[in-house]
Image (cartoon, rainbow, N blue to C red):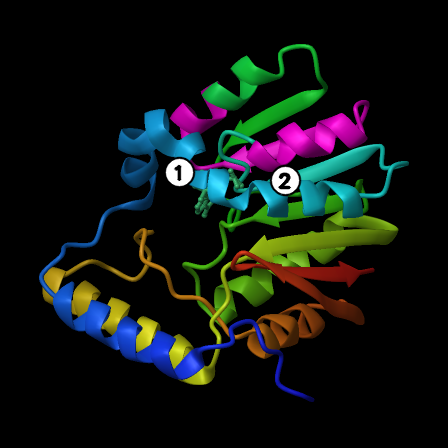
Amino acid sequence: METIRIRNNVTTYMEELKQWAEHSKEKCLEEMTEFFRVRVDGYEDHMSVWQEAYEYLAKIVPKDAKTMLDIGCGTGLELDEILKNVPNVNVTGIDLSETMLKRLKEKHPEKNVKVRKGDYFKEDFGKECFDVAVSFETLHHFTAEKKEILFRKLYNSLKKGGVYIEADYLACCEEEEQLLFSVCAEKRRMEKIAEDVFVHFDTPLTPEHEIACMKNAGFLDVKFDACINGASVIIARK
Ligand SMILES: C[S@@+](CC[C@H](N)C(=O)[O-])C[C@H]1O[C@@H](n2cnc3c(N)ncnc32)[C@H](O)[C@@H]1O
């Protein structure tokens, strides 16, 4: 398979990333739910860098979708755009953070948006019940092993012909993937944080690795679609 290029200046980027890793050695890891709880007020402004990617994602969601699953929906920035294009879709949004889900519910009281507070690795998504599943900037903290299990659940939850659309931060090369996983593992070791505690530290996979996880999970038709301001869009069809 040809390498998927998501960054032009890989050499400079990797030099800067290594410097950043060195300088942030002393910085403690933050637990995932707490990370978002304390930042919820400035969160949507912070994420506005991805406005173009939210709009792009919304255009890919099939207009005739009746049911949609959004994992790691947060305050629902992608849903704000999707609901403009597909206003009657029944959405199930899953997120760890009660604070983020509360904001989402306040924004769309009149829409068919059901929220579930929970861990998407543990939540039951059901069988063949969604036309579309989406995730936006939520999966870049997890290992390939965990993702593969999650993608299998997503695959099973989609109806025949359904589609999973992911937009996320991916690593530009294997060196980036390996560097960030090893920095995170070292921090966990130093701070004595167990593997099963979710921390907000970026450990993206390369596009090839992410796609392989989706294919191993059962998706046969998986396409790298675009990279918009750092959000890589992958479309996986059942
Ligand atoms: C950067 S935010 C993105 C939120 C939303 N998709 C958006 O783009 O605005 C990541 C979200 O993923 C959620 N999250 C992270 N790990 C999760 C897990 N294991 N189960 C459910 N939600 C999770 C966080 O609580 C957070 O709300």
Q: Give the residue at mark 2.
A: 70
The answer to whether residue 24 is left or right of residue 9 is left
Q: How many numbered discs, if any?
A: 2
Is disc 2 surrounded by few (<14), some (14 to 19) or many (20+) residues within 10 Å? many
Residue 236 higher or lower than 181, as above or below: above
Asked if the magenta segment contains residue 82, the reply would be yes
The answer to whether residue 153 is left or right of residue 37 is right
Question: Does label 2 point to a residue whose CB lies under 8 Å from ligand 1?
Answer: yes
Span highlighted in magenta in the image: 77-102
Q: In which image quadrant can residue 6 be found?
A: bottom right
Give the residue drawn at x 39%, y 38%. Answer: 46
Amino acid beneath label 2? Asp
| Separation (CA) of disc 1 from disc 2 | 20 Å
Is disc 1 surrounded by few (<14), some (14 to 19) or many (20+) residues within 10 Å? few
Q: Nearer the viewer, residue 191 or 63?
A: 63
> Looking at the image, do the residues carrying marks 1 and 2 touch, with CB atoms under 8 Å apart?
no
Residue 178 seen anywhere in this rendered image of the structure: no
Location of residue 32 in the rendering, given as x and y in whole percent from the top left corner: 33, 45
Location of residue 26 in the rendering, given as x and y in whole percent from the top left corner: 9, 61
Location of residue 121 in the rendering, given as x and y in whole percent from the top left corner: 51, 51
Residue 8 seen anywhere in this rendered image of the structure: yes
Q: In which image quadrant can residue 151 be found?
A: bottom right
Q: Which mark is residue 104?
A: none
Give the residue drawn at x 48%, y 44%. Answer: 49
Asked if the magenta segment contains residue 74, the reply would be no
Give the residue drawn at x 14%, y 54%. Answer: 28
- Please tell me whether mark 2 sits on a helix, a strand or a loop: strand
Mark 1 or 2, nearer chain start: 1
Q: Quadrant of the C terminus?
A: bottom right
Q: Which mark is residue 46?
A: 1
Residue farthest along the top direction in this orientation: 110
